């Protein structure tokens, strides 16, 4: 036994494994405290340019593919977009009227006005770097005001996830679909609230719903604002299946997220103390 | 073998990993480029070098992901060591050897990783490991033989310089 331990390779392995355990413990402690971890920060200085370079190539390739499409495909897309613009203009006019009415009636009902949300716009430079975690790296860090735990959304106030950690110039975000991710959520229609958890798959699980919760397939799920980390009212997804257990006396719902990590290019980080404009 | 080029390749692989299009996914998992580079280099080196490179690979990959840094380091160090150990035991000219080595080393690496980071759905985890094994095996074939050729040329150059 001692003979094996004296071998250079085995000794190297043992020393490196021990160092790995030590570094891992230090990293976990820093992550829990939300404080920077020096080794991590130094390595990211090397890794960020590499990730940014491949991101630029990726974007350029996507643009080239889009530009090289045949003319008839572009014309069809143009017609579709024109229809979409007309529909959105109509919808926008109706929403503006509703917002105006809302602003007028809120003081009359004694309700607080929703503050305009302040966000930090950022670009995703790398995503799903590991098979096991639904994480991504964005190009804004502590210097831009990004902090651990802040909510990350994309266009249409669709919730992507939360900030996991930050360094000076970049941040890591964890998507809702990650198995370590959980957020308070409720259905928009019936206001039945529960806990939304990632499953490391394409779906989310809305659990801890009351036994007789009024939830059905097609219901839109929004963040409930519980815990005051993620603001209330952010769109999370749509229910695709409801499971009621008579024995356990509980209801669970499978939710399809409104956005997948693979589809995101730009994100917005909601600054603390902000609410979603309605 | 020196650590310079392997580490540069690992940094490039880590940068590319996060920008791989989802079209390259097999059974829901993309190939792990950092692991592919680690296995390919370690298969042409000794166990101590493999462990050292594995440590660097784990450090880089763990930093990029931002979670479970310790698990990344430990699993990659052991994988590099085992890959280096395999070199001394196997005949590596056969293309099946690096491909099959990539499969069993990926299984060992991910099994160790899952021990410290259990997933809620075992079926999904197994499917992802299978997909990653296929992707890693195919890529290792290309990377391994490219590295082997470069290493052979380097040795010939060194020998010529000595003569």
Image: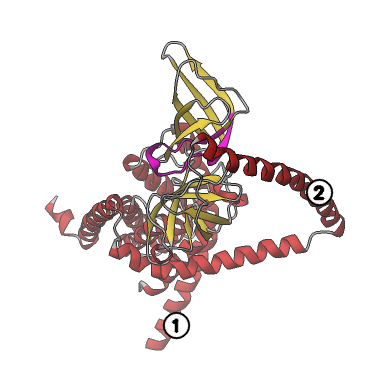
Q: How many marks?
A: 2
Identify which residue, B141 or A158, lies in the foreground: A158
Instruction: Say if residue A111 shows up in the picture.
Output: yes
Looking at the image, residue B48 sits to the left or right of residue A107; the answer is left
Residue underneath mark 1: B157
SS state under label 1: helix
Reply above or below: A25 against A60.
Answer: above
| Residue identified by numbered label 2 | A80
- Is residue A21 or residue B45 the one in the foreground? A21
User: Which of labels 2 and 1 is toward the front?
Assistant: 2
Q: Is residue A206 above or below residue B12?
A: above
Residue located at (44% from left, 38% from top): A225
Q: What range of the chain is rendered magenta? A: A221-239
Task: Indicate which disc residue B139 carries.
Answer: none
| Element carrying mark 2 | helix
- Residue B119: in magenta span: no
- Residue A243 on image: x %, y %: 52, 20
Q: Residues within 10 Å of mark 2 (few under 14, many from 20)?
A: few
Quadrant assignment for the N terminus of chain B: bottom left
| Picture residue at 80% right of the left edge, 48% below the top | A86
């Amino acid at each position: 036994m001692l003979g094996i331990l004296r071998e250079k390779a085995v000794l190297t392995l043992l020393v490196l494994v021990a160092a790995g355990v030590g570094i891992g413990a230090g990293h976990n402690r820093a992550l829990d405290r939300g404080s920077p971890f020096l080794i991590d920060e130094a390595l990211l200085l090397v890794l960020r340019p590499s990730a940014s370079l491949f991101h630029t190539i990726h974007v350029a390739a996507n643009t080239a593919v889009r530009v090289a499409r045949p003319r008839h495909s572009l014309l069809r897309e143009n017609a579709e977009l024109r229809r979409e613009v007309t529909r959105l203009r109509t919808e926008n006019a109706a929403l503006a009227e509703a917002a105006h009415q809302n602003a007028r009636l809120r003081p009359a009902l004694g309700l607080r006005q929703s503050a305009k949300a302040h966000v930090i716009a950022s670009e995703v430079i790398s995503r799903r770097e590991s098979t096991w975690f639904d994480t991504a790296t964005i190009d804004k860090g502590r210097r831009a005001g990004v902090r651990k735990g802040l909510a990350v959304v994309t266009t249409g106030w669709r919730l992507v996830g939360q900030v996991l950690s930050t360094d000076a110039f970049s941040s890591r975000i964890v998507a809702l679909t990650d198995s370590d991710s959980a957020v308070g959520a409720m259905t928009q229609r019936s206001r039945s609230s529960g806990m939304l958890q990632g499953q490391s798959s394409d779906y989310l699980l809305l659990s801890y719903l009351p036994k007789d919760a009024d939830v059905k397939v097609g219901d839109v799920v929004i963040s409930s604002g519980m815990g005051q980390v993620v603001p209330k009212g952010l769109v999370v997804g749509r229910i695709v299946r409801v499971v009621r257990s008579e024995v356990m006396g509980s209801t669970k719902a499978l939710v399809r997220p409104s956005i997948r990590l693979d589809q995101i290019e730009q994100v917005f980080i909601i600054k603390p103390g902000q609410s979603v404009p309605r | 073998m020196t650590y310079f080029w392997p580490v540069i390749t690992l940094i490039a692989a880590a940068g590319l990993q996060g920008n791989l299009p989802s079209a390259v996914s097999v059974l829901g998992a993309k190939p792990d480029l950092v692991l592919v580079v680690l296995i390919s280099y370690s298969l042409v080196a000794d166990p101590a070098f493999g462990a050292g490179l594995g440590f660097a690979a784990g450090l880089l990959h763990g930093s990029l992901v931002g979670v479970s840094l310790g698990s990344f380091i430990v699993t990659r160090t052991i994988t590099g060591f085992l890959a280096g150990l395999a070199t001394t035991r196997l005949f590596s000219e056969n293309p099946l050897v690096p491909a099959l080595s990539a499969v069993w080393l990926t299984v060992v690496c991910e099994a160790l990783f899952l021990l410290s980071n259990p997933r809620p759905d075992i079926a999904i985890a197994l499917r992802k490991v299978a997909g990653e094994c296929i992707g890693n095996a195919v890529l290792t074939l290309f990377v391994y033989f490219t590295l082997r050729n470069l290493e052979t040329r380097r040795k010939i150059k060194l020998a010529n310089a000595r003569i």
